[in-house]
Amino acid sequence: MNADGIVALVTAAGIELTDRRRNAEGDGWSLSFANGATVEVGDDGSARIAGKGSKAVRGLLDLPPAPRRV
Amino acid sequence: MKRSHGLALFSSTLVLFAASAASAFAAQPGDPPDGITKIETVVVIFAENRAFDNLYGHFPGAEGIDKASQESLQQRDRDGSVLSELPPVWDGLTAKGVTPPVTQAMTEHLPNAPFTVNDAKGFNVPLSVTTHDLWHRYYQNQMQINGGKNDMFVAWADSGAMPMSNWDASKTDMWAVAQKYVLADHFFMGGFGGSFFNHQWLICACAPYYADADKSPAKPSISVTDDNGTALKIADNSPKSARDGIPKFVSDGNLTPDFHAVNTMQPPYQPSGTDPAPGGDPLLADPAKPTTLPPQTEPTIGDMLSLKHITWAWYSGAWQYTLDHGNKSPVPNFQYHHQPFNYYANYAPGTEARREHLRDGGLGGVSFIQAIDDGALPQVSFYKPQGNLNEHSGYADIEAGDRHIADVVAHLEKSPQWPHMLVVVTYDENGGIWDHVPPPKGDRWGPGTRVPAIIVSPFAKHGYVDQSPYDTTSILRFITERFELPVLHGIVVRDRAVAAHGEPPLGDLTAGLDLK
């Protein structure tokens, strides 16, 4: 999954993209959405979701739930 | 600080003016309309993201799609040529998870014209279904309006044909309310673009500001525009035709080149999409995050009302629920950037003003409805439905929000305060959806696309279509005149700009009322 694909899927669900920038390492994109979710998407297709709206965004991207903290 | 000083000076001038007018014992230009004091309670209900033609394009007596010229119905490609057909709705017309879906393939080869989503002979998607969201952004909205021709909505969209969609809403509850009271058919959104910006226009008639943004975490969010400053600079790798894909821009950010925030940024206070800083104050949003807007200090209509000791409140659906439990999707799907006062230092956590004026509307609006039923509304109320009830494309459907708002209106009609009430039901912005009427030419911030507005009151002209030119600031004009408030700077600038373009002045909603 690439950054453009993630942006298209999430914004189609009414969750605005609020920030998009190359990450500090230069190996991917950092995306922020209006519901508070952030997605770190690597150029290798990896995706890491965090923030308040992460559950909704994870569902839109068909990614498995985040592992529970113990 | 400079603006506050200017406001104080302006207020003093106003006091002098008021004194001299009173001594003249005669109506003066700029005086409130006769009978305006019959309105004692003002309620503003702010729904989401529908252009006028999208819902009321076939309303009897209104300037709807039926009255649009053939030229205004046709969309042009990015090179200015007329499209031979509409591009498909990229990724499909219905929202993810909707069954049966209307896929991208099913939207191929649509004629270059508006289409009705719930047309039984077409897609036949009911009003209860959530559809694909569309770009609704500050610069794109100006590019789509294209100087008033409204022929580039598809060209500068991210959703292909979707801007040309509309609905047969003639069976909705709010359609019936509009038939009973007043439908304003020339009401335009106050600012270009999206919800964040238009909520600011509802309360402040201003563009928020991010000082020294070029030295801040938000620096990469500064937009790159063309020489006119009204359109984004197109990227070299942008598809040349709307039929080939979504346009790309050099930098499509939240800030103008001179640091005004025009697209969605997060409130500096909780509830905010931005978490608190690690180890920081849990009531604040992390200011180091690039999407956090610093606290704003421009005077708002709330400040003006408080100045004159007029009671007021912003009721937000699911406000307290979200503070207590966090947000949940799809219900209530609280929207952080739909809470405009939460961006202002005057309403920061811990202030008396916040406690008094930023009120919980309750889940599904139950607390707001309780206040209505009890006759306990302040003189001015703003009501923001929670996310799943606001009619926003992508995460809400029209039917649920329409029914909710009509239910609120029904409670208002039975309220002890109803005999002296004015209710305005409108939409914050067009949601990226096409409308055929050119907006009045104003200042650099707006007005933008036409949106529906319904004026409800025992003093409303019944069964009336009000063709007066209005925008979101018309609500502020009414409140300002009714309660004799100092005029917000943005309204003065808008008035001057509209006059300079030779446009008729924007009204104060009283043309829809019979106050005699």
Image: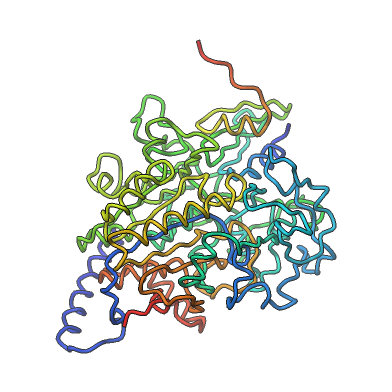
Tell me if B18 is positioned left or right of B437 in this view. left
Front residue of B278/A63: it is A63
Tell me if B243 is positioned left or right of B349 in this view. right
Residue B26: which quarter of the image? bottom left
Residue B430 higher or lower than B151, as above or below: above
Residue plotted at (26% across, 74% down): B37
Residue B291 on image: x %, y %: 49, 41
Residue B482: which quarter of the image? bottom left
Tell me if B18 is positioned left or right of B442 in this view. left
Front residue of B493/B28: it is B28
Point out the image quarter for the N terminus of chain A. top right
Residue A17 higher or lower than B37, as above or below: above
Residue plotted at (40% across, 31% down): B276
Residue plotted at (47% across, 55% down): B405
Query: What residue occupies the far front of the structure in this picture?
Result: B414
Residue B77 on image: x %, y %: 78, 64
Front residue of B497/B197: it is B197
